[in-house]
Image: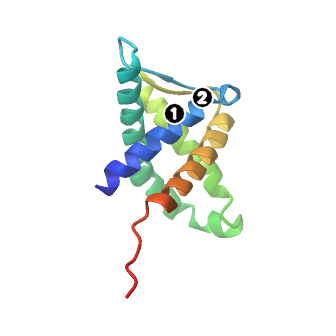
C-alpha cells in the first residue's frame, strides 16, 4: 500500500514539474494522447522512477557514502538528478515517457520532486496514537 501511495505522489510531483516550462522536462503520453493516457503515463513513469530509486539509488548511495560525508549530503542532489535522468533514459526507449532535455534541469526537477514528496510525506504519514 505504501508503494502505491508513493507512486501516486511521485506521479503528481512529476506532473507538477512538467507544468513548469522553464525546466525543460516533458512527458509524452501513450499513443492516443488523451487525459487518461497522460495519467497512466505519469503513473508508469513514477513506478519506474520508484524502482530505479529503490534499486540503483540504494547501491549508488551505499557506494557514495564517503561523498555524502565529505559534501554534507549535497551530493544527494546530483544523485537524485542522475536517477531522474536515468528514468528518462529508460522510458525514452519507447514512444512515451519522461524527457529531460539536460542533466542539470533533471537535478532541479529532482529537487522539486523531492520537496513535493516531502510535503506530501508529512501530510500522508500515519499518526501515532496518543495514550
The percent position of residue 34, horizontal first and vertical second, equals 39, 16
Q: Quadrant of residue 32?
A: top left
The percent position of residue 67, horizontal first and vertical second, equals 64, 63
Q: Quadrant of residue 47?
A: top left
Is 130 drawn above or below residue 30 in the view shown? Answer: below
Residues under numbered marks 2 and 1 in contact, where contact means CB atoms less than 8 Å apart: yes
Q: Left of 30 or right of it: where is 116?
A: right
The percent position of residue 79, horizontal first and vertical second, equals 58, 50
User: Can you identify the residue that label 1 sits on?
Assistant: 15
The percent position of residue 24, horizontal first and vertical second, equals 64, 26
Q: How many numbered tags mark residues here?
A: 2
Rate crowding at label 2 as few (under 14), some (14 to 19) or many (20 or more) other CA atoms within 10 Å. few
Q: Which mark is residue 19?
A: 2
Between 115 and 85, which is closer to the camera in this rendering? 115
Between 90 and 105, which is closer to the camera in this rendering? 105
Q: Left of 128 or right of it: where is 22?
A: right
Tell me which residue sits at (42%, 39%) in the image.
Answer: 46
Amino acid at each position: 500500500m505504501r508503494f502505491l501511495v508513493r507512486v501516486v505522489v511521485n506521479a503528481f510531483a512529476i506532473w507538477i514539474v512538467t507544468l513548469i516550462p522553464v525546466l525543460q522536462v516533458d512527458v509524452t503520453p501513450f499513443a492516443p494522447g488523451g487525459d487518461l493516457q497522460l495519467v497512466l503515463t505519469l503513473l508508469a513513469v513514477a513506478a519506474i522512477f520508484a524502482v530505479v530509486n529503490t534499486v540503483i539509488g540504494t547501491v549508488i548511495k551505499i557506494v557514495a557514502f564517503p561523498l555524502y560525508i565529505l559534501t554534507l549530503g549535497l551530493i544527494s542532489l546530483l544523485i537524485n538528478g542522475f536517477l531522474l535522468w536515468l528514468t528518462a533514459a529508460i522510458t525514452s526507449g519507447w514512444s512515451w515517457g519522461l524527457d529531460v532535455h539536460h542533466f542539470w534541469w533533471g537535478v532541479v526537477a529532482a529537487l522539486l520532486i523531492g520537496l513535493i514528496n516531502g510535503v506530501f510525506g508529512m501530510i500522508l504519514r500515519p499518526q501515532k496514537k496518543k495514550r
